[in-house]
Amino acid sequence: MNFNRTLSIMRKEWRHIIRDRRTALLVTLSPVFFLVVLAYSFSVEIKDVSLAVMDYDHTPLSRSYLQMLTASGDLKTCCQAANYDEIEQWLTDGKVKAALIIPPDFDERASTGETAQVQVIVDGTDPNTANHAIRHIVSRSANFSTRLLSAELARLGTPLPADSSPVDVRMRTWYNPSLKTVIGIVPALVGVVLGMPAIAASLAITREKEWGTLESLVATPVGRSELLIGKLVPYIFSGMISVVLCAAVAVWWFEVPLRGNFLLYLLLSADFLLATLSIGVLISILVSSQQAAMIISLLVFLFPGFFLSGIFIPLSAMGIMKMEAYMVPTTHYVLINRGIFLKGAGLETLWPWAVALLVIGLLVMLLSFLIFKKLID
């Protein structure tokens, strides 16, 4: 592969982005516009929450309490924690959305008419899920207090003061204590709106086909890999401009905290753009018109980005659709964004999703090279 020829294609594509107002708008400014609009527009109620449990009591009463919390299916016990470090790690990784800690004197205090305290830690990066967990745990705890503990204490002949509550739930919300929806949803929406550069990239080859210039490019000494890489790289650079703009809007307009490393955020954003833009280039190879490429790109990037990326519905609640969700680059980028912005997570936590994006990008790009070669031959 000749670097100078690849550089010439890159310069050609960059000049097209600058000169074509539609492409420049689609690649750089439209993600910011969509970010502002969608952040104010979307709010969806969650119906399932993954719950970690740390039961220090291990009594029939504590098990009965946990069974009542999870009986409806709104809460799902996914793992048993041995200590707080495991809970913190699972919350940081996104494995669980809430954690329940039952103290060792839960049965003893409840059986003697005293208040038994339990602690609940909720991941606030997804306010809809956090609010649902809080409402469900509080209401179920109150129901458990009145229906089970009061009956048991009455059977034992122990008086229960009218103003007492057998179970006292102490709530702690991590990462987004105020539970503002906009703080939780804006970092996730960045992954959706940054699909717009990929839509522009899907027009890269189809535009050459419609204009009749693809044959001229193929007739030159420019190789196939040089042509595709030369098409791809300018969109990555222009997409990075939009990444910076979206981050600025999120931090200064919506007041979303950026607790992680900004350089790491830029690096993983470039990883995400490689994955999505590679898919866009593949689409442009497979179709023959810009209109068809635009429609397919919207179906590939926009709709799965909303409904399969875990923005509104936890991945653990998707069931059979979970595998399809992990095939969408936006799913991994949403986890990365929430991790960097709200949790201050580093590469040691985010590397699985970064590797997934890199693998998607490289495999799709390799497939593009193979298919493009067959089409030209």
Image (cartoon, grey):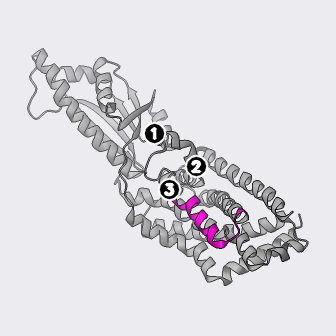
Question: Does dot 3 land on a helix, a strand or a loop?
Answer: loop
At which x and y percent is residue 167? 23, 31
Q: Residue 138, relative to residue 238: is it above or below?
A: above
Asked if the residue under mark 1 is in contact with the one under mark 3, i.e. CB atoms within 8 Å, the reply is no
Dot 3 surroundings within 10 Å: few (below 14), some, or many (20 or more)? Answer: some
The residue at the point 38 percent across, 66 percent down is: 40
Return the disc, 3 or 1, that comes first in the chain's sequence: 1
Which residue appears farthest toward the top when viewing the image?
A: 156
Return the disc, 1 or 2, that comes first in the chain's sequence: 1
Judging by the rendered image, the residue that carries numbered circle 1 is 96
The residue at the point 91 percent across, 72 percent down is: 221
Q: Tag on residue 259? A: 3
**Residue type, label 1:** Val
User: Count of labels shown?
Assistant: 3
The image quadrant that residue 5 belongs to is bottom right
**Mark 3 against mark 1, which lies toward the viewer?**
1
Q: Main secondary structure of the magenta part?
A: helix
The residue at the point 72 percent across, 54 percent down is: 364
Q: Tag on residue 346? A: 2
**Residue type, label 2:** Gly
Separation of marks 1 and 2 at Cα, in angstroms: 18 Å
The residue at the point 48 percent across, 69 percent down is: 34
Dot 2 surroundings within 10 Å: few (below 14), some, or many (20 or more)? Answer: some
At which x and y percent is residue 60? 30, 18
Asked if the residue under mark 2 is in contact with the one under mark 1, i.e. CB atoms within 8 Å, the reply is no
Nearer the observer, 286 or 166: 286
The image quadrant that residue 99 belongs to is top left
Nearer the observer, 219 or 7: 219
Is 214 inside the magenta-drawn segment?
Answer: no
Please give the range of residues in magenta: 286-303
Q: Is residue 344 visible?
A: no
Q: Residue 91, relative to residue 309: is it above or below?
A: above
